[in-house]
Image (spheres, helix red, strand yellow):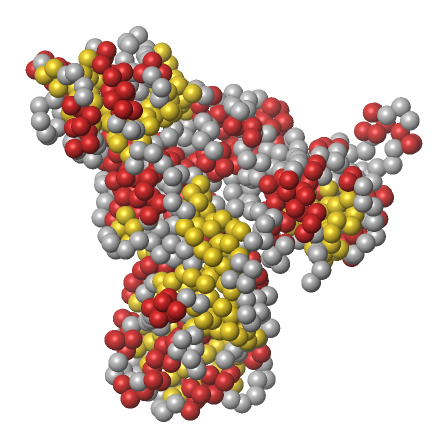
C-alpha cells in the first residue's frame, strides 16, 4: 500500500525565464539525488508547486529541452501563490509534490496523425507531449499545431515553435484575434483555421488545451472535419489542493480532475462541459 | 440482534466496569453527554455523565432535548456531531517547512499524537458513514496517513438505535438502526442492562473482563421488537439508493432554483454530514519567515473558494453549490465509490437553519412532473 | 530589500481595530523587527505624510477632514488595506445615513460645532482599496494573516466563507437550531473565530456579509423564529447597516 505523497521535495531554481509580461518559466532541479533519480513523469501530468510560507498551486510539467535531469514549470502570475513564485530568482528553493494525474494517451497516439490545439498559456501541458513525439518522430504521423493567443506578445516559447516548425511533416498555425497581424499569423480564432490542417482526419488524435469555451468549439469543428470524438483528448483545469483525490475541490461531475484527469477523453466529459457552474 | 455469537447480558450496574476495563486496557474514553443543549461526545469520566432520561426532538431546522419518563441512557437518536471529527478533525497539521540558513527547505511530516480512543454510544448510521470515509481516505492504491492513524486508534462501542428522530431515514439507506458489522463491541440497551456482543478480538478482550450472564430469550425478543419498531417508525425514506438515473440531465431543472430560494448557502449541511470529506490546505499564519506549518481545514462546496479557478468561482450561485452537494452525495458517490454518500442520519435536515430536507428535495426529482393541463 | 514601511491611519472610528495590533502580544515585537512602522499615532509614531508599502486604514469617511485626508494616503501607499467595519462598510455611524438631515439638531445642544458629512461612507467609496478586513473589531489573527503574506511579497487574501463554517469547526452547537436564537451566522463572513456562538450567543453580523448570501431566506427564517418585522430589521441594522447586501432587506421584507 502506498501512502499519500506527504511532504514536498526541495527543488532549486536553476534558471528563470520571462516568457511574456505575466508568464515565466522556472527551470528546476530536485536537490535530493535519490528523488531526482526516481522522478518520472508522463506528458500532461502536473506537480503541486510550493512557495515557502505561502502555499501550493497545481502546474503542469514541461520537460526541459536540454537537460533530462531538469523539469520546467511555466507559470502565469495571476493568483496569490503564482504572483509570489514570480518573484523567485535563480538559486532560490521551492517545493514540489508530484507528479500527479493522468497524462496524454501517448501510447494510443503512436502511428497516428497528431493535432495539437491550444489557447493562451494552455500550450504548457502539450510541450512535453511534443518533446515526446519529437524524440520518436518516425513513430508518429503528421503533426499539426494550432495555437491561438489574444495578442502576438502573448505567444510564449517562440524558440520552441521555431524548432517544432523544423520537425518533419509538421505544420504550425498561429492565430491571434489582434487585427492586422503580420505573416505568418492568421487572424481570428483557432476554430476558423482548423480546416487548413494538413492531416488525415480519419486516423488523427487530438490534444486540446486552453479555455473551456475554446475547447468546446474546437471539438465541435473537429468532428465536423471528420475526426472521431473518441480521438479527442483535453486537459482540464480545476481548483486543486491535495493533488491526490482527497480534498474534493477539483470535482467535476463524478471525476476528481487531479486523479482521473487532468487529461480526459472528450466522450468522458462532453456532457459536463455543457453545464454551467458544474 | 444480528449475526455472531449469542449475545450476553451486561447488567446496568456493570456499565461502570466496562468503562474501567477500557481504561485499564489503555483507552481514553469518550461518550455522549449533555452539553450546550445537545448530546455531544465528550471525555467520559463516569457513566453518571451519560444522558440519563433524555431524548431528542428533531425536525427540519430544529433540535431540542426533552426529559423522558424512562431512565435509559441512550434513548435519543443522534447529536450534532458524528465520528467525523475523531477521524478527520476540523484542523489537522500535515507538514512543516523550515527554511535553512543555506536557503534550502527542510520538510517534515506531522504524525497525530493520539492515544487509543474508545467511543461509547456510536450509532449504526455513523459507523456506516465512517466505513464510507474509509473508502475515500484509505483507497487501495493510496492511503491518507493522518486519517489512517486516527482511524486505527478507535475502539468502537455501538449502541443500537431504538429512538430514531423524525429526521432519520437509515432504514431506507440500509445503514441502521441496528449495527451489523464494523464495530468492536455492540450494545443493545434494555431497561436494566444491555445485550452485548463483540465482533473483533479487541472487543472480545474487553468482553472477557466483564461479569456477564447469558441473555434470556425474552431479552433478545424485546431487543428485536425494539429494533423492528425503530426501523418502521421512521417517517421518511429516500426514494432510491442510486440517484444517478434520476439526476441525469436535470442540471437545469427548476427544482434547483426553488431550493436555492431557501438555501442560505451557509454549508452547515456539509459540516454536520458524517461523510463530507472536502478540506482545503492552508498554512498557519505566522510572522516567522523561517518556519511554516501547513494544515488541512474542513471546507465546504458551499464556499466561493471551493471551486475557485483563476480568481473566480466555477460555481457562483447557491443553486449550483446546492446542486453540487446533493448530486455528489446521492449520485456521483456511486460512480466514485460504488455506494451512496448518504447514510440516513438526518443531520443535514436538522442542522439546516431553514430546514431544507434532503429526502423531500431529492424525492421531488424522483416523481414524474405533473402534466400541464 | 529594506524592511517594508507600514502605516496605520485612523478616520471616524473607536480605535478598537488598532488594538488588534497591540493584542498581537509577542508577535507585535516580531512584527516591529520585520517592518518599519512609520505612522501609528496610537503607538506613538507620527508621520502621516510618509510614503509606505502598506497603509492600514481604520474608520469611515464621516467628516470633511476625513474626505481630504484619504486621497493623500492612497497616493502615498502601494497597498491600502481597510481594517474593521467602519472603514469597510461605513460602520455603526452609518446608521445616520438612514435618517437623512436633521439628526444633528435632534442630538446636540449646539449642532453648529459638529462638523460631519451627511453620510458615513466606507473608504472604498472614495479611493481604490486593495483588501478589506471585516470585523468589529478585527482580530489579531486577521492581521497575522495579512502581514504573514505581505512579508513574503504575496498579496494577501481575506476569508470569504460563512461564520457557520468556523463555528462548526470549533465544535460549537448551533444556537439557531438548538435554541431558536436569531443567529446571523449563515449570512455573515467568518473571521472572528465564531466568538459569540461559541458562548451560546447568536451572531449579530459584526464581520459583515459573506460574498454570496441569501438575505430573504434569512429574513423568513427569523420570522419563523417569532421575530417581528422591526426585530428582524434590527438584526441587519447593527454594525453594517450601510452595506449593500444587508440593505437588500427592504426588498426581502416586501
Picture layout, residue A131 above or below residue A44: below
Q: Residue at x 60, y 48 (%)?
A: B287
Q: Is residue B305 above or below residue B233?
A: below
Q: What quarter of the picture does the C terminus of chain B occupy?
A: top left
Question: In the displayed structure, would residue A201 be above or below residue B229?
Answer: below
Q: Nearer the viewer, residue B45 or A117?
A: B45
Residue B192, horizontal then vertical, whole percent? 21, 10
Q: With C233 as the anchor, is C16 left or right in this view?
A: right
Q: Is residue A173 visible?
A: no
Q: For residue A103, what is the image quadrant? A: bottom left
Residue B67: x and y in percent read 36, 11
Residue at left 38%, top 54%? A6
Q: Is residue C181 above or below residue A212?
A: above
The picture places residue A127, in percent across and down from the top left corner, at: 41, 77
Question: For the point 82% across and 49% down, which residue is it?
Answer: C48
Task: Single out the residue that lies furthest toward the top.
Answer: B69
Left or right, A23 with reference to B172: right
Q: Nearer the viewer, residue B237 or C168?
A: C168
Quarter of the image that includes the N terminus of chain B: top left
Q: Quadrant of residue C41?
A: top right
How many labels were placed on the picture?
A: 0
Amino acid at each position: 500500500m502506498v501512502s499519500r505523497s506527504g511532504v514536498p521535495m526541495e527543488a532549486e531554481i536553476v534558471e528563470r525565464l520571462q516568457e511574456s509580461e505575466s508568464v515565466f518559466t522556472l527551470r528546476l532541479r530536485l536537490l535530493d539525488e535519490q528523488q531526482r533519480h526516481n522522478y518520472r513523469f508522463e506528458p500532461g501530468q502536473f506537480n503541486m508547486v510550493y512557495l515557502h510560507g505561502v502555499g501550493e498551486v497545481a502546474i503542469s510539467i514541461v520537460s526541459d529541452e536540454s537537460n533530462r535531469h531538469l523539469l520546467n514549470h511555466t507559470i502565469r502570475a495571476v493568483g496569490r501563490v503564482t504572483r509570489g513564485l514570480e518573484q523567485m530568482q535563480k538559486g532560490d528553493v521551492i517545493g514540489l509534490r508530484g507528479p500527479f494525474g493522468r497524462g496524454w494517451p501517448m501510447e494510443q497516439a503512436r502511428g497516428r496523425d497528431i493535432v495539437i490545439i491550444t489557447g493562451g498559456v494552455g500550450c504548457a501541458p502539450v510541450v512535453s507531449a511534443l518533446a515526446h513525439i519529437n524524440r520518436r518522430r518516425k513513430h508518429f504521423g503528421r503533426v499539426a499545431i494550432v495555437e491561438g493567443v489574444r495578442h502576438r506578445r502573448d505567444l510564449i516559447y517562440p524558440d520552441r515553435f521555431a524548432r517544432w516548425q523544423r520537425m518533419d511533416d509538421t505544420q504550425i498555425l498561429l492565430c491571434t484575434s489582434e487585427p492586422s497581424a503580420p505573416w505568418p499569423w492568421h487572424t481570428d480564432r483557432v476554430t476558423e483555421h482548423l480546416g487548413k490542417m494538413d492531416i488525415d482526419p480519419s486516423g488523427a488524435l487530438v490534444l486540446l488545451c486552453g479555455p473551456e469555451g475554446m475547447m468546446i468549439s474546437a471539438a465541435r469543428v473537429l468532428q465536423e472535419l471528420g475526426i472521431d470524438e473518441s480521438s479527442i483528448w483535453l486537459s482540464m483545469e480545476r481548483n486543486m489542493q491535495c493533488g491526490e483525490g482527497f480534498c474534493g475541490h477539483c470535482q467535476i461531475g463524478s471525476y476528481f480532475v487531479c486523479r482521473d484527469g487532468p487529461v480526459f477523453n472528450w466522450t468522458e466529459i462532453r456532457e459536463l462541459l455543457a453545464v454551467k457552474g458544474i | 440482534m444480528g449475526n455472531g455469537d449469542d449475545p450476553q447480558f451486561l447488567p446496568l450496574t456493570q456499565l461502570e466496569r466496562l468503562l474501567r476495563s477500557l481504561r485499564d486496557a489503555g483507552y481514553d474514553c469518550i461518550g455522549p453527554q449533555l452539553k450546550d443543549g445537545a448530546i455531544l461526545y465528550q471525555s467520559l469520566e463516569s457513566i453518571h455523565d451519560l444522558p440519563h432520561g433524555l431524548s431528542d426532538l428533531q425536525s427540519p431546522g430544529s433540535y431540542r432535548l426533552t426529559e423522558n419518563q424512562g431512565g435509559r441512557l441512550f434513548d435519543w437518536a443522534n447529536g450534532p456531531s458524528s465520528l467525523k471529527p475523531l477521524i478527520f478533525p476540523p484542523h489537522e497539521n500535515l507538514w512543516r517547512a523550515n527554511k535553512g540558513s543555506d536557503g534550502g527547505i527542510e520538510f517534515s511530516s506531522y504524525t497525530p499524537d493520539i492515544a487509543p480512543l474508545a467511543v461509547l454510544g456510536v450509532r449504526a448510521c455513523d459507523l456506516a458513514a465512517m466505513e464510507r470515509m474509509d473508502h475515500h481516505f484509505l483507497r487501495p492504491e493510496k492511503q491518507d496517513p493522518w486519517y489512517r492513524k486516527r482511524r486505527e486508534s478507535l475502539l468502537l462501542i455501538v449502541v443500537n438505535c431504538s429512538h430514531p428522530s423524525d429526521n432519520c431515514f437509515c432504514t431506507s439507506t440500509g445503514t441502521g438502526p441496528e449495527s451489523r458489522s464494523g464495530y468492536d463491541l455492540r450494545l443493545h440497551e434494555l431497561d436494566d442492562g444491555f445485550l452485548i456482543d463483540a465482533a473483533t478480538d479487541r472487543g472480545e478482550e474487553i468482553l472477557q473482563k466483564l461479569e456477564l450472564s447469558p441473555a434470556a430469550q425474552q431479552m433478545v425478543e424485546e431487543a428485536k421488537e425494539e429494533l423492528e419498531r425503530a426501523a418502521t417508525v421512521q417517517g421518511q425514506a429516500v426514494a432510491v439508493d442510486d440517484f444517478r438515473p434520476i439526476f441525469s440531465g436535470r442540471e437545469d431543472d427548476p427544482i434547483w432554483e426553488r431550493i436555492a430560494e431557501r438555501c442560505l448557502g451557509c454549508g452547515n449541511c456539509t459540516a454536520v454530514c458524517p461523510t463530507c470529506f472536502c478540506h482545503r490546505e492552508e498554512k498557519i499564519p505566522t510572522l516567522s519567515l523561517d518556519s511554516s506549518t501547513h494544515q488541512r481545514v474542513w471546507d465546504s462546496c458551499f464556499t466561493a473558494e471551493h471551486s475557485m479557478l483563476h480568481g473566480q468561482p466555477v460555481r457562483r450561485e447557491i443553486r449550483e453549490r446546492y446542486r453540487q452537494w446533493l448530486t455528489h452525495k446521492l449520485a456521483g458517490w456511486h460512480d466514485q465509490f460504488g455506494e451512496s454518500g448518504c447514510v440516513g442520519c438526518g443531520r443535514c435536515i436538522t442542522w439546516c437553519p431553514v430546514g431544507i430536507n434532503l429526502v423531500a428535495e431529492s424525492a421531488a426529482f424522483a416523481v414524474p412532473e405533473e402534466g400541464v393541463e | 530589500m529594506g524592511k517594508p514601511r507600514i502605516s496605520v491611519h485612523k478616520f471616524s472610528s473607536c480605535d478598537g481595530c488598532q488594538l488588534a495590533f497591540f493584542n498581537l502580544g509577542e508577535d507585535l515585537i516580531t512584527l516591529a523587527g520585520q517592518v518599519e512602522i512609520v505612522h501609528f499615532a496610537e503607538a506613538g509614531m507620527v508621520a502621516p505624510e510618509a510614503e509606505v508599502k502598506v497603509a492600514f486604514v481604520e474608520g469611515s469617511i464621516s467628516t470633511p477632514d476625513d474626505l481630504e485626508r484619504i486621497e493623500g494616503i492612497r497616493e502615498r501607499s502601494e497597498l491600502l488595506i481597510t481594517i474593521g467595519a467602519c472603514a469597510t462598510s461605513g460602520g455603526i455611524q452609518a446608521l445616520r445615513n438612514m435618517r437623512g438631515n436633521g439628526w444633528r439638531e435632534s442630538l446636540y445642544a449646539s449642532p453648529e460645532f459638529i462638523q460631519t458629512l451627511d453620510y458615513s461612507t466606507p473608504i472604498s467609496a472614495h479611493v481604490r482599496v486593495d483588501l478589506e478586513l471585516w470585523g468589529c473589531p478585527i482580530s489579531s489573527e486577521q492581521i497575522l494573516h495579512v502581514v504573514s503574506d505581505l512579508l513574503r511579497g504575496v498579496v494577501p487574501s481575506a476569508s470569504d466563507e460563512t461564520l457557520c463554517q468556523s463555528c462548526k469547526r470549533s465544535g460549537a452547537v448551533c444556537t439557531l437550531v438548538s435554541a431558536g436564537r436569531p443567529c446571523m451566522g449563515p449570512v455573515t463572513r467568518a473571521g472572528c473565530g465564531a466568538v459569540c456562538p461559541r458562548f451560546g450567543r447568536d451572531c449579530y453580523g459584526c464581520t459583515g456579509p459573506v460574498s454570496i448570501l441569501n438575505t430573504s431566506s434569512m429574513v423568513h427564517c427569523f420570522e419563523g423564529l417569532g421575530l417581528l418585522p422591526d426585530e428582524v430589521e434590527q438584526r441587519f441594522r447593527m454594525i453594517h447597516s450601510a452595506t449593500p447586501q444587508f440593505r437588500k432587506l427592504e426588498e426581502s421584507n416586501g
